[in-house]
Image (cartoon, grey):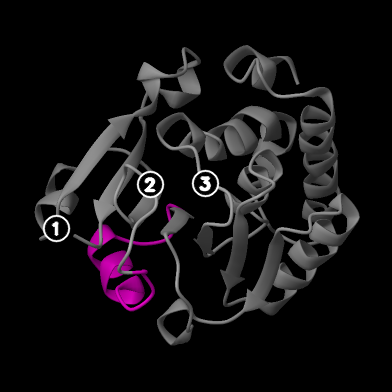
Amino acid sequence: MELIQKYFPTLEAPTTQRLQHYAELLADWNSRINLISRKDTESIIQNHILHSLSIARLIEFHPFSNVLDLGTGGGLPGIPLAIIFPKTQFHLVDSIGKKIVAVQRMITDLGLENCTAEQCRVEQHQGTYDFVVTRAVAQSVKLVDWTKHLFAHYHEHDLKNGILALKGGDLKEEMKAVKRINKVHHLSKWYEEEFFETKKLVYIRMRK
């Protein structure tokens, strides 16, 4: 947990302990179901939990706001965010049933009352959210098309309602195709570890 505490020094001990518990649960479930790359098992804290928490470097979700995690896989980035924002409501969706079963079990084991998980395709999902978060699920144009019906028209944050997508690599051509206000944040401005040198957080505004 030293790495989490390095960048999030104000987190209280019960919160960091819960993040550690999640890392252990994720490793255990990953030995049975392919939730994350097997080569990342020894780097879950950095490559998955701290990476997911990058979103919290950009925005502090308000109490009672609603966030959808698209293509959650093993609960990323939704579960780490739900742990550090206990008054924000998180709904995690994935089209693969066995992954959702694992995520639901982890949510229960962690005692997360602000987090739910559902098997569905996001294009068919009905709900109203302030933000959609996701990790490298699809091209940004597809993310916009899949989620445009899900955003509340009012906003409660300084950052207008939209998509927060963790991605990697060169995104210049990808973002040119997005006909909405957007901004690419380089994670290397927040973290000094080599892993984050090519990692980015994309914000796409979905409401005026």
Residue 89: image x %, image y %? 62, 59
Q: Please indicate, yes or no, whether residue 170 appears anywhere in the rendered image.
A: no
Answer above or below: position of 76 versus 152. Answer: above
Q: Mark 3 and mark 2 in contact (Cβ < 8 Å)?
A: yes
Q: Residues within 10 Å of mark 3 (few under 14, many from 20)?
A: some
Which residue matches tag 1? 180
Q: Residues within 10 Å of mark 2 (few under 14, many from 20)?
A: few
Left or right of 87? Residue 171 is left
Residue 182: image x %, image y %? 19, 47
Answer above or below: position of 9 versus 152. Answer: above
Which residue matches tag 3? 62
Answer above or below: position of 53 versus 151. Answer: above
Kindly report the distance in space between the C-alpha atoms of the residues bearing marks 1 and 2.
18 Å
Left or right of 150? Residue 183 is left
Left or right of 174? Residue 45 is right
Instruction: Name which residue type carries label 3.
Output: His
Which residue matches tag 2? 157
Numbered disc 1: secondary structure: loop
Compare residues 204 and 10 and report the one nearer the observer.
Answer: 10
Q: Residues within 10 Å of mark 1 (few under 14, many from 20)?
A: some
Compare residues 196 and 207 and report the one nearer the observer.
Answer: 207
Q: Residue at x 21, y 40 (%)?
A: 183
Q: Residue at x 18, y 52 (%)?
A: 174
Q: Residue at x 65, y 15 (%)?
A: 9
Kindly report the distance in space between the C-alpha atoms of the residues bearing marks 2 and 3.
7 Å
Occupied quadrant, residue 120: bottom right
Mark closest to the chain's N terminus, 3 or 1: 3
Q: Which residues are magenta?
A: 135-152
